[in-house]
Each structure stands twice: as C-alpha cells, then as structure tokens.
Image: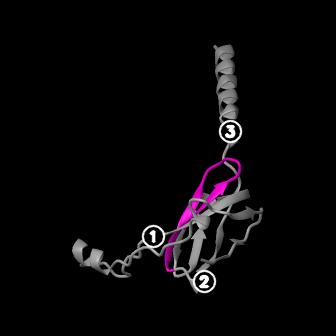
Amino acid sequence: MPGIRLILCGALLALNLGCGGVSDAPDRRVVKGSVTLNGKPLEGAAIRFLPQPTGPVAAGKVINGMYEISNKGGVPLGKHRVEIKGTPILPADTEGKSLGEIDAATKPAIPIPDKYHSKSELEASVEAGSEPFIVDFELKE
C-alpha cells in the first residue's frame, strides 16, 4: 500500500503544479485624465480604450471633465484607439424621485464630432508603471 500512496501523492502534486497561476490576461494600468470640448470640461460622456490591433476593451465614464478607468486593473498596456461619446447627464440626486422626474431633469447628451467616437482618430499608448497613467484629451469641433 505505501507504493500506491506515493503514486497518488505524486499525481496530486503534478495536478497542483499544472494548475498554477499563469494568466493569459494582459498587464494593465489605471488610466485617468481630463476631457475638454472646445476648452470646457465635458459634462458627461463614455470613454473607451480599444487595444490595437486587438484585445480587451477598457471603458469608463467622463463626469465633469474627469475620468478614471480602474476596473479589472485598468487599461491593458500598449497602443489604443480611443473613443469618446456624449451620454445623457443624469441629475446628481435621484433619491426619492420618480422615473418621470429623473427623466425630466436629465440633460441630453452633448454631441461630439464623429472623429472622436465612431470614426475616432484619438490614440493613446499606455506604458507600464505603478502610479495612474495620465492621458488628457482636448476635443475641438
């Protein structure tokens, strides 16, 4: 019986080593910055970093001209095409309000030229580091 125990222990050890912590996920970094349109902070928008040529997309919200993408560790390292699209701006306080009141207080999305979203020409290269990587965007109509 001691031989069987030794074989079982060896098999379990091999299985354990085979399931190690190797990950296919790309290295990431928190990215934050500002977004202005014609020199004024963009009130509300969505920002997306699309890795080039492919990879997982990272996205966040622009609120009062500022954004920070930190979910899942941030934006994958490397070169990205960046899309920024205006979103409806909800009221700051919605507690206790009906959907009709919230809808009436919601500001429409600020139109942003196609060259910044569907046909974006914006680019950013995210480099390795421990501190947040700062990328500011100055959009012009």
Residue sitting at 65 percent across and 48 percent down? 55
> Does dot 1 land on a helix, a strand or a loop?
loop
- Residue 119 visible in the snapshot: yes
Q: Amino acid at mark 1?
A: Thr
Of circles 1 and 3, which is in front?
1
Magenta span covers which residues?
43-60
Q: Is residue 46 left or right of residue 15?
A: left
Q: Position of residue 87 (x, y in %)?
A: 45, 70
> Toward the viewer: 77 or 108?
108
Residue that label 1 marks: 87
Mark with earlier residue (1, 2): 2
Q: Amino acid at mark 3?
A: Gly
Residue sitting at 62 percent across and 50 percent down? 56
> Does dot 3 land on a helix, a strand or a loop?
loop
Q: Is residue 100 left or right of residue 83?
A: left
Of circles 3 and 2, which is in front?
2
Residue that label 3 marks: 20
The correct choice, above or below, for 97 with respect to 21 in the image is below
Residue that label 2 marks: 38
Picture quarter with the N terminus: top right
Q: Is residue 46 magenta?
A: yes
Dividing the picture into quadrants, the one containing residue 107 is: bottom left
- For disc 1, the neighbor class at 10 Å (few under 14, some 14 to 19, many from 20) is some
Q: Amino acid at mark 2?
A: Asn
- For disc 2, the neighbor class at 10 Å (few under 14, some 14 to 19, many from 20) is few
